[in-house]
Amino acid sequence: MYMTFRWYGPKDPISLNHIRQIPKMKGIVSSLHDEPTGVAWDLAKIKSYKENIESYGLNFKVIESVPVHEDIKLGRGSRDEYIDNYITTIKNLAQAGLEVVTYNFMPVFDWTRTSLDTPFPDGSNALTYKHKDIMAMDPTSPDLTLPAWVKYSNQELRGLLEAYKSVDNEGLWKNLEYFLKAIAPVAHENRIKLAIHPDDPPWSIFGLPRIITNKAALERVLSIVDVPENGLCFCTGSLGISPDNDCVDMVKTFAGQKRIHFAHARNVSIDGDHDFSEVKHTNDVGNIDFTKILKAYFDAGFEGAIRPDHGRMIWDETGLAGYGLYDRALGATYLQGIWDAFESTK
Ligand SMILES: [Mn+2]
């Protein structure tokens, strides 16, 4: 395992210089954030982005993410063009020396929360989700903006929601299958590891299909194209908010099969039926015990990247919700400490 940190590029308020000061920080996870969804990434741009990161003594092997165009998820006629572009991007990333491509297959909305800054008694704040608040929202209301939503115009959003009415869960699986059967063989040839991120939260919102929600779904993804490169970004913070999901068991299974290519470490507290808060990484709170999770990775001989996923805002820090410096740095050192204890006593 090696420790990484997500960086949103030159516009990120947290600098590479600060990130490299975190103890045992080895690498950066990032993306060409200015590229519109669906285009093929230019090799020269990838190379110069990578060189900049590496000039700080950090490696850059993991892309998070190459976004999947909605036309691919919807199975529209234009998807082949976008898949061709995705293939070009995979080849260019391989040529530039990248190793892992993270993606997700969530329709329209990426990770969704109802509050970005719920205050906690200790003076910190963090992201939280209340299902009844989501259910009361009209996603096409012009007044409504929720965190992490792709910024579609109101009209585009209405069009997309309408289009998804004809795509149920099984339809979305078919479209994922079509996509993976096209790109996984290319990833295999080019030694690029594909890492699908589970749906966050792992249930349907606004009537949209969501399919990457549990162990059976992860098994199904891997079976679509059974090559080692077709794998997972295992996110405890997404899968762990469903009480039916046993994350330790899943790490044992999928890391054991060498199909986890990237690990997200986020602790979450289940506050009620479909309600949750993101909490600190330590095992005195929340539903994820990283001593057990990391032991499962350790026993499986996991060699991939891990990163502290979202963190709280502490010490009066402000910035990108979930992506402050301080709490994620604490998370990284906590996780690294657990790992080092396993290493030194094996
Ligand atoms: Mn995650």
Image (cartoon, rainbow, N blue to C red):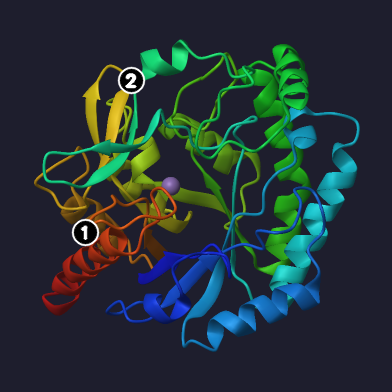
What residue would you read off at disc 2?
Answer: 274
Label 2 crowding class (10 Å Cα cut-off): few <14, some 14-19, many 20+?
some
Cα gap from disc 1 to disc 2, whole angstroms? 29 Å
Residue 32's place in the image compared with 122, above or below, is below
Q: Amino acid at mark 2?
A: His
Label 1 crowding class (10 Å Cα cut-off): few <14, some 14-19, many 20+?
few
Question: Viewer-proximal residue, 20 or 140?
Answer: 140
Q: Report which quarter residue 46 is drawn in.
A: bottom right
Q: Residue at x 21, y 50 (%)?
A: 280
* Secondary structure under the numbered disc 2 in the rendered image: loop
Q: Position of residue 53 (x, y in %)?
A: 55, 80
Q: Is residue 307 left or right of residue 74?
A: left
Q: Amino acid at mark 1?
A: Trp
Q: Report which quarter residue 49 is drawn in.
A: bottom right
What residue would you read off at disc 1?
Answer: 315
| Quadrant of the drawing holding the C terminus | bottom left
Q: Residue at x 75, y 48 (%)?
A: 37
* Mark 1 or 2, closer to the camera: 1
Q: Position of residue 291 (x, y in %)?
A: 16, 55
Q: Is there any visible trace of residue 96 in the rendered image? A: no
Q: Residue at x 27, y 79 (%)?
A: 23
Q: Position of residue 333 (x, y in %)?
A: 23, 69
